[in-house]
Image: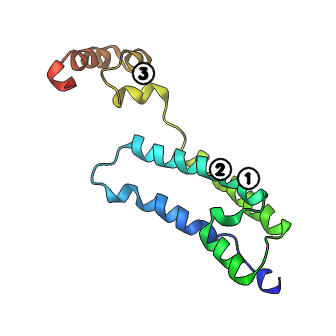
């Protein structure tokens, strides 16, 4: 357990964060909705990982799991608490810096949907233009 005292929890998240960080850059056209979906997915994964750590199932983080297997060490309660706190902190930070898109903006994704037209936060003129767009059958196809 001596080699584990100075273990830092942060490197176990780097691979997961790098995937999130580079995913939008691989595409030439990225919308705010695609990025929002990726961030929402990552926040849900943070929530998903928490019980695994709490229940002493570190295989959710391959690097950490490999380290523990190679060194024949178990996660101490203190380390589990630190990891869980870090997961909660990441979730809070993501929710603060990347708030969810407003429902009134979903008409952009579904411009032909009546449901999203009604909830769209647009001026009268903008709604008129959207009606023109919605009724253009060549655009819809």
Dot 1, how many residues are within 10 Å of its Cα: few (below 14), some (14-19), or many (20+)?
Answer: few
Quarter of the image where one finds residue 106? top left
Q: Which of these two is toward me, 93 or 30?
A: 30
Percent position (x, y) of residue 16?
54, 62
- Of marks 3 and 1, the one in the foreground: 1
Q: Which residue is mark 1?
A: 51
> Going 37% across and 17% down the picture, which residue do you hit?
117
Q: Write down the residue under mark 3.
A: 121
Between label 2 and label 3, give the one nearer the viewer.
2
Q: Residue at 36% of width from left, 15% of height from top?
A: 114
Q: Work out which residue is located at the far right of the displayed protein and give it.
A: 77
Q: Decide: marks 1, 2 in contact (CB < 8 A)?
A: yes
Instruction: Judge whether 56 appears above or below 117 on screen.
Output: below
Q: CA distance from mark 1 to mark 2?
A: 7 Å
Mark 2 burial class by Cα count in 10 Å: few <14, some 14-19, many 20+:
few
Q: Nearer the viewer, residue 54 or 138?
A: 54
Secondary structure under the numbered disc 3 in the rendered image: loop
CA–CA distance in space, label 3 to label 1? 39 Å
Which numbered disc, 3 or 1, marks the residue that appears first in the sequence?
A: 1
Q: Earlier in the sequence, mark 2 or mark 3?
A: 2
Please provide percent x and percent y for residue 104.
45, 25
Relative horizontal placement of residue 56, taking residue 136 as reference (left or right):
right
Which quadrant is the N terminus positioned in?
bottom right
Residue lying farthest to the bottom in this orientation: 2
- Residue at image position (53%, 67%) is 15
Q: Is residue 92 visible?
A: no
Task: Kindly check if marks 2 and 3 are in contact, taking CB atoms under 8 A apart as contact.
Answer: no
**Label 1 element class:** helix
Task: Give the secondary structure at mark 2.
Answer: helix
Residue assigned mark 2: 48
Q: Is residue 14 visible?
A: yes
| In-front residue for pair 20/141 | 141
């Amino acid at each position: 357990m001596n080699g584990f005292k100075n273990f830092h929890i942060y490197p176990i998240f780097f691979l997961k964060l790098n995937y999130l960080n580079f995913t939008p850059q691989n595409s030439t056209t990225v919308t705010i909705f695609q990025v929002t979906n990726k961030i929402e997915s990552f926040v849900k994964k943070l929530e998903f990982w928490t019980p695994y750590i709490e229940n002493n199932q570190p295989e959710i983080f391959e690097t950490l799991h490999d380290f523990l297997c190679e060194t024949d060490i178990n996660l101490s309660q203190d380390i589990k608490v630190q990891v869980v706190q870090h997961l909660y902190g990441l979730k809070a930070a993501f929710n603060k810096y990347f708030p969810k898109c407003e429902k009134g903006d979903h008409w952009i994704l579904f411009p032909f949907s009546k449901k999203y037209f009604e909830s769209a936060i647009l001026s009268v003129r903008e709604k008129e233009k959207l009606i023109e767009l919605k009724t253009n059958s060549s655009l819809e196809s």
